[in-house]
């Protein structure tokens, strides 16, 4: 730092120039309205999600130059309400010997002197033999003022010397830091032990710059997939919540699905001994596209989570010529109810509701359309129940983003209690996963849904937040119809709002 001026590297300056020039070529209506998307190019995980100097900050895994994954930068945006976002210049670029192949995921805290401390994973490709390279991962620090950041001269601050025995230096990433009540710092980091599965390591620090290994907080023992990425840990309603995103999952009934998944452990955390005792496990999201969430504590004490609304195996759903790929989920307020994690759309979303349309006790048999119920930026509350309890409907469906060619559907079969999201007819031309089924709770065939649409996505909050299903869809925007269908006879209540960003 020269005086108060932070010197930026050529690589970062180029990225900033590029995003400034090309970001504005993307028209507003070509992006989600209130979900954060990359300024230009590619976005994955939320990083450094925090409240700093009166604003929420969201950084993100970012490759500005193409709409596909590349050497990772950190993009940056700020918001007052987590729904209206303003882009700031990219914060980090891979420009040092210890991070030249990528600045991977990490987190942010505020230092006592008011500066912001970022910790991220620095990646360097190491030649093995023949044409094989492996990524060595270390933890690095940058300090800044909320716009410009200077990398710490002593980087990396954690490397292979700080790993427990058998911990892999090739899978050691995604530090999530927090400030403890006594002013010291702690952080959790994903790692791969000798058994090839995942573990979460706990580190502590007196000043945020010098870190020590404390313990293996949780071991996967090959229970939930393999390597665990992007951990987060926090207290909620008297319990400790540990979030992680395991790779290479196998399905378990309807709870976990194949591939990259999400995992929520509820338990007890003993800070003294650095141990976690698990009481309950569940998926975080039961849809197709949700990964690597991070949380923030709002100034009024709410724990709010945002995830990357995408799945690594479904990235090809968007054509490569599209100017951006990747978007964040809706901010979700978390709570614990009945021993489970509950999620609700952040309450600030209610302030964007316009043009209420209300229908009560509509009988649906076959296809029904309702006047005023259409659109792609929509908040829709729906309760469905059998018309005749003795003779319940077989199947109920709501179709949206619909025209004569395309639609995405949510369907519910009360006998099986299965809710399915299906985007097979959304216009996708790729042979990827288009459906996901989830087991939901229903009493007497009644189900309550809140469905949020924002141009390229649907998020379904089931039974007041007991479960959430998220999926992206890149259907042409003119497909904005919404219709209801029942095989048998169902009764529905519908409350629909447009959502407006002004
Ligand atoms: C998760 C992840 C992280 C890593 C980042 C790289 O989606 O693989 O583990 O830090 O993405 O972009």
Image (spheres, rainbow, N blue to C red):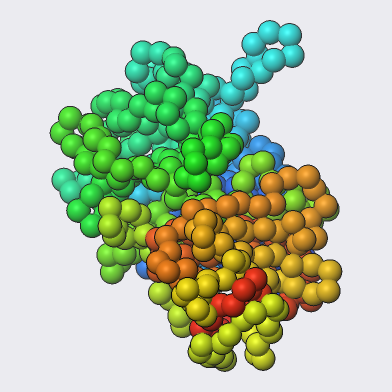
Place of residue 144 in the rendered image (x, y in percent of width and height, measured from the top left): 44, 50
Q: Is residue 120 above or below residue 348?
A: above
Residue 291, given in percent of the width and then of the height, sits at 53, 47
Quadrant for the C terminus, please: bottom right
> For the view shown, which residue lies furthest in the top direction?
129
Residue placed most toward the observer, 93 or 186: 186
Residue at image location 61% in from the left, 19% down from the top: 134
Q: Toward the viewer: 349 or 335?
A: 335
Q: Is residue 272 left or right of 102 when viewed as pictured?
A: left
Q: Where's residue 187, x and y in %?
A: 33, 38
Q: Position of residue 488 (x, y in %)?
A: 62, 73
**Residue 497 visible in this rendered orientation of the protein:** no
Question: Residue visible at 35% across and 26% down?
Answer: 219
Is residue 429 toward the left or the right of residue 151 in the image? Answer: right
On the question of residue 303 being in view, the answer is yes
Counting the numbered discs, the total is: 0
Q: Quadrant of residue 140?
A: top left
Above or below 379: residue 101: above
From the viewer's side, name the closer residue of 334 and 278.
278
Foreground of the two, 61 or 284 = 284
Q: Residue at x 53, y 21 (%)?
A: 170
| Residue farthest front in this picture | 390
Residue drawn 66% across and 65% down? 409
């Amino acid at each position: 730092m020269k005086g108060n001026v932070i010197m930026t590297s050529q690589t970062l300056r180029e990225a900033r120039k590029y995003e400034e020039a090309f970001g504005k070529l993307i028209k507003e209506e070509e992006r989600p309205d209130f979900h954060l998307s990359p300024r230009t190019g590619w976005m994955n995980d939320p990083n450094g999600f925090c409240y700093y100097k009166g604003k929420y900050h969201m950084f993100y895994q970012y490759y500005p130059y193409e709409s596909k994954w590349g050497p990772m930068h950190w993009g940056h945006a700020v918001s007052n309400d987590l729904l209206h976002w303003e882009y700031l210049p990219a914060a980090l670029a891979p420009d040092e010997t210890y991070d030249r192949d990528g600045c991977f995921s990490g987190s942010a805290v505020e230092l006592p002197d008011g500066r912001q401390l970022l910790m991220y994973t620095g990646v360097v490709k190491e030649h093995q033999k023949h044409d094989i390279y492996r990524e060595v991962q270390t933890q690095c620090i940058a300090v800044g003022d909320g716009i410009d950041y200077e990398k710490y001269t002593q980087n990396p601050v954690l490397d292979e010397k700080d790993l427990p025995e058998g911990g892999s230096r090739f899978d050691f990433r995604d530090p999530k830091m927090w400030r403890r009540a006594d002013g010291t710092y702690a952080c959790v980091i994903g790692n791969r032990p000798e058994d090839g599965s995942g573990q979460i390591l706990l580190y502590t620090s007196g000043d945020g710059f010098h870190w020590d290994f404390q313990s293996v907080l949780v071991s996967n023992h090959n229970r939930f997939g393999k390597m665990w990425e992007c951990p987060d840990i926090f207290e909620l309603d008297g319990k400790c919540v540990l979030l992680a995103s395991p790779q290479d999952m196998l399905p378990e009934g309807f709870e976990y699905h194949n591939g990259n998944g999400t995992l929520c452990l509820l338990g007890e955390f003993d800070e003294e001994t650095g141990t976690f005792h698990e009481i309950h496990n569940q998926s975080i999201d039961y849809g197709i596209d949700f990964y690597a969430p991070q949380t923030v504590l709002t100034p009024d004490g709410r724990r709010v989570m945002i995830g990357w609304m995408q799945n690594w195996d479904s990235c090809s759903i968007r054509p490569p010529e599209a100017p951006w790929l990747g978007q964040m989920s809706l901010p979700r307020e978390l709570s614990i109810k009945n021993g489970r994690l509950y999620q609700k759309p952040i309450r600030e979303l209610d302030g964007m509701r316009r043009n209420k349309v209300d229908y009560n006790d509509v009988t649906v048999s076959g296809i029904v359309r309702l006047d005023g119920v259409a659109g792609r930026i929509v908040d829709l509350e729906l309760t469905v129940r059998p018309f005749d309890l003795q003779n319940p409907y077989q199947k109920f469906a709501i179709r949206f983003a619909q025209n004569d060619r395309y639609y995405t559907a949510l369907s519910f079969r009360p006998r099986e209690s299965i809710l399915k999201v299906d985007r097979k007819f959304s216009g996708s031309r790729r042979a990827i996963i288009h459906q996901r089924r989830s087991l939901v709770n229903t009493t007497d065939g009644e189900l309550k849904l809140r469905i949020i649409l924002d141009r390229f996505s649907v998020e379904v909050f089931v039974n007041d937040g007991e479960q959430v299903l998220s999926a992206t869809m890149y259907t042409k925007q003119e497909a904005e119809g919404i219709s209801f269908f029942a095989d048998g006879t169902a009764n529905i209540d519908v409350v629909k709002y447009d959502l407006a960003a002004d």
